[in-house]
Each structure stands twice: as structure tokens, then as C-alpha cells.
Image: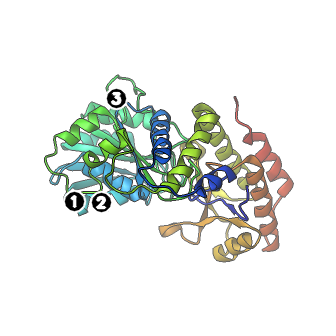
Amino acid sequence: MRNKEMLLIPGPTPVVDSIYDALAEETRSHTDHRFTAIYRSAIEKTREMLNSDGEVFVISGSGTLAMEMALVNTVEAGEKILVISQGFFGDRFIKIADAFGIEAEVIQSEWGKRVDPDEVKEKLASGNFKAVTITHADTSTGVSADLNTLVPIIKSHGALIILDGVCATAAMEEDMSKSYGDENAKIDVVLSGSQKAIGVPPGIAIVAFNKTALAAREQIKRVPAYYCDINNWIPIMNDPSKYFATPPVNLIYAYEEGMKLVLAEGMENRYKRHKAFGKAVRAALAVYGMKAIADEAVAADTLSCILYPDGMDDAAFRTALAEKGLIVAGALAHLAGKAFRIGHMGNTTDQMLEKAVVLFGETLIEQGFEADTEKAVMRFRELATPVR
């Protein structure tokens, strides 16, 4: 990669040369047949990745726009949603719901832990919820959602499932055709962005609706949106030569190349690689006395939130790492200054992550802490190779 720094934050993530090359291709008209062929390919590759039987939307926007698009096309003002929140970003659905007159109730887990499934059952039994939102991997905590447990519970109460996959898509399984114990127990909507595990620069919003979610849209007489109304986008997704709003031409070039790389690696191989990388990074940093706030049983495969040893100066530590060419992110909310967040997803490699482990150790020593770098590297190597 020609990147000058190792960008190991929860997103954006490192971009490989072939994606940069695609991004730098000549800008063409959004109706040029050469571009529309690439756009069509990008849409179909997204459909293949998510295994969707409905409609897939690949448009200009952020993950937040994708959240809004998912919600307003399935839930009307005055209806209720249940937000399952395992960190800062799960709570964003509350604000989006409020903006559109949708009533939101929340189950908030303790940071670093998952929600209690029994609490979900009790809450769903107490009210008529149109949909339930789940953040697959919360970017603030590094906690993953237990879909195998949550999906059948939610579907048994007749609610739609909206899965926020922004920090999970292309790294953690999000198969929309998968049945969770019952043929009707499936994920209805998956939303994501281009800049995390897919490994493409920011700017593309991704949303997939299954047939059940599409039927919910048809029951809504008036969606309180224009750009986010999926009915305005369906004709374009089925035939990209048609026009509704100008697509991000060069980003679509880059995204299509990114999707080629995702599918060439194979989804199962990607799931295994990300799981191995997550375990290896957390185990290596534990050698330094740095503990993930999420226990291994609930930890996400794409990023980790790591607590500092006592006495660490967050700003000084991350600044020193940045001077060495390693960029990690600060923690959010009440963990700010007490922890940092590291991404290990997308186009990151074992060589990059091993180098990061070394730089962590060196920086700890420079700042007066003990660090057995050799032991940490060995621990990383033990776990970083996925089982094929």
C-alpha cells in the first residue's frame, strides 16, 4: 500500500493501491454506459455479499444517512421502535426516530457488555413495536450483537429487524437469506458504509431491504423524505442508466474495486480472518496490561476498545504513536482519556497489525511503562492466522 501511515482506527480504514487507482480514473458522465456498467456491477456485488432477495441501494452518503434511509422507509410517525444499544452509536437511532416523530424505547447495556435477552423478551411483550434496531458491532465499545439469540426473539414478536452493519459489513456474517431457527426469522434491513471493513474511502451509503421490509415501505402512504425515499431509488438500482440524483462517480469506481476484493477473498475466509485478527490484537495488547473493555466472548471482530494501564496520558500516548506513523482513535463518552480504540478490519494485514503491536510496546517503554514486546509479538503470531 502507498499509504504513509497505518490508519488503525474504527474507520476510515487503510485503502489498497488498486482502490486508489480506481478512484483516480477519469470522471465520466453518470449516464455514460462505461460508468453505468460499473455501477450495475457494484450493486450486484453488494447483493451477493449480503445475499439479499430484495433491493440493494448503493448511493452517495454516510452511514448516518443509511440509518435514516432504513428507518423512514419501514416505520411511520407515531409507530414505535425498540433500540438495542450496546454503546454510543446504537443511541443514534433515538435521535433519528425523534426527528421523524417515531417513538423510540431503548434497552441500553452496560458498556463492554451485551444486552440481556430476557430484557428484550420482556420489552417486546410489553408493547407493539414496528421494528427493532441492532448495532452489529458498536464502534464505541467493540461489543458485538448476538444475532443468533436476538433475531429469533424479535421475529417471534412480529417486528422488523434493522441491522446497523456499519462497522461489521464484509467482516462479520450478515447473510440476509439465513434463517435463525425458523424460515421467517431473518434480518430485514442491513445498512452500512464504504469506509470500514469494505476498505473504501468514505462517502457511500449502503442499504439492503428484504421483501418483508419492501412490503412495509409499500404500506407507508407518505415517506417524510425525498432523497431517502427508496421508491425514488429502486428504478436506478435496477437500471443505473436512469437518473434520480447524481451518483459519486469516482467513489463508485473505487467501491466496485473494493467489492471485487471482498468477494475474491470469499466471505467465509473474511469472517475467519477478522475473527483471528481481533483475538490476536487483544491477546497481544493484554501482554502489556492493556485490557479490552469487552470480554472475548462478546468482542467484535473488527475493532477493540482498549483500557490503558493506570497512569497513562492518553493524548501523549496517541501523539507518540502518530509520530511513528500509527494512528489509533480515542475513546468516547465516559471512557475518553481512559482507553483507545483500534481497528483491525478491511484491508489491514497481519504484518501491519504485528508492527502496531511492536510500536505499542516501544511507546509504552518510552513513557516509563514495562512492556515485553517479544512476548506480545509471539502471542499475536499464535492467534493471527485464521483456521481455513
The residue indicated by pointer 3 is: 185
Q: Are marks 2 and 1 in contact (CB under 8 Å)?
A: yes
Give x and y (percent) for residue 68.
32, 55
Q: Quadrant of the N terminus?
A: bottom right
The residue indicated by pointer 2 is: 96
Q: CA distance from mark 2 to mark 1?
A: 7 Å
Q: Can residue 312 be seen here?
A: no
Q: What's the amino acid at mark 3?
A: Ala
Give x and y (percent) for residue 6.
70, 61
The tag earlier along the polypeptide, 3 or 2, is 2
Q: CA distance from mark 1 to mark 3?
A: 27 Å
Residue at image x 52%, y 58%?
27
Question: Could you say whether the residue bearing mark 2 is in a helix, strand or loop?
Answer: helix
Q: In the rendered image of this protein, does residue 174 appear above or below residue 144?
A: above
Which color scheme is applied? rainbow
Q: What's the amino acid at mark 2?
A: Ile
Residue at image x 61%, y 33%?
266
Number of marks: 3
Report the mark closest to the observer, 1 or 3. Answer: 1
In front: 179, or 265? 265
Q: What's the amino acid at mark 1?
A: Phe
Give x and y (percent) for residue 63.
43, 56
Q: Quadrant of residue 3?
A: bottom right
